[in-house]
Image (cartoon, helix red, strand yellow):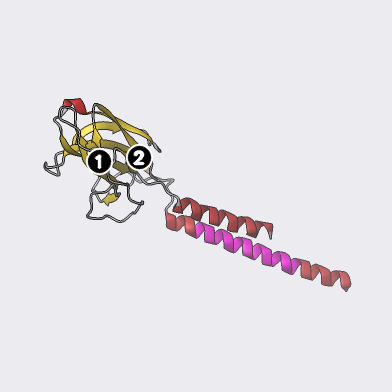
Amino acid sequence: MKHLLLTFVLAGWFALVQQTTPAPTLDRPLPGEAVQGVVLIQGSSAVEGFASAQVEFRYEGGSAETWFLIQDQTPAIESGTLASWDTTTITDGIYRIRLRVLRQDGNIVVVEVAGVRVRNYTAVETNTPAMMPETTHQPTATQTATPVVIRSTPTPMPPNSISVTGTELRGSALAGLGVVAALFLLLIIYRAVRRRTRRG
């Protein structure tokens, strides 16, 4: 009985871990915020299967393909400083910042913040940054920091001989549950037979 209970507890724990997988975020600067000098870009780049991350910027009115590197990260960061952006080296204007997180499976998760106003050489208007929306995992057409998964075609990696897929993990868990149930049933039968032999 204890083994069966332990198996159910472990299965629940695995389900909880899968539901609380971290997602990348850009917390500062906020959309519409005016910035000057060296700006600390805050957020999280930690995701399941993290491989690497980059923080980039582009001019809001420029080509969507022209991004400039701020920092090329190697470690995963959770709720901290992702990069230092020296805005004195660029002209004043409205910029977009993005965080690109590459996963080990080749997928890329992108988070963008739009409307960041660089104001080193011009007067700063009233600073009215947009309020951060509640976290959502669905891409929207509004200019908010929303994670978007981009499919890419990475070079194939050699097969990992010790990798385990989710299907294999679930199959093993179900097989374990079956074994525990069978052992529990055998224990009940054994006790019943033993009681009968004692009475007889």
Q: Position of residue 45 (x, y in %)?
A: 35, 40
Of residues 70 and 191, the one drawn nearer to the viewer in this rendering: 70
114 displayed left or right of 131: left
The amino acid type of the residue labelled 2 equals Ser
- Of the numbered discs 1 and 2, the one sitting upstream in the chain is 2
Mark seen at residue 83: none
Quadrant including the C terminus: bottom right
In the rendered image, residue 186, in percent from the top left (x then y), is placed at: 69, 66
Q: Position of residue 180 (x, y in %)?
A: 62, 61
Whether 185 is among the magenta residues is yes
Name the element at disc 1.
Answer: strand
Q: Tell me where the magenta segment starts and ends, as one range.
A: 171-190
Q: Is residue 53 left or right of residue 125?
A: right
Find residue 54 and report its horizontal and vertical position in percent.
Answer: 27, 36
Q: Considering only vertical position in the picture, is 41 above or below 47? A: above
Q: In the rendered picture of this protein, how many numbered marks are placed on residues?
A: 2
Name which residue lies at 24% across and 26% down. 37
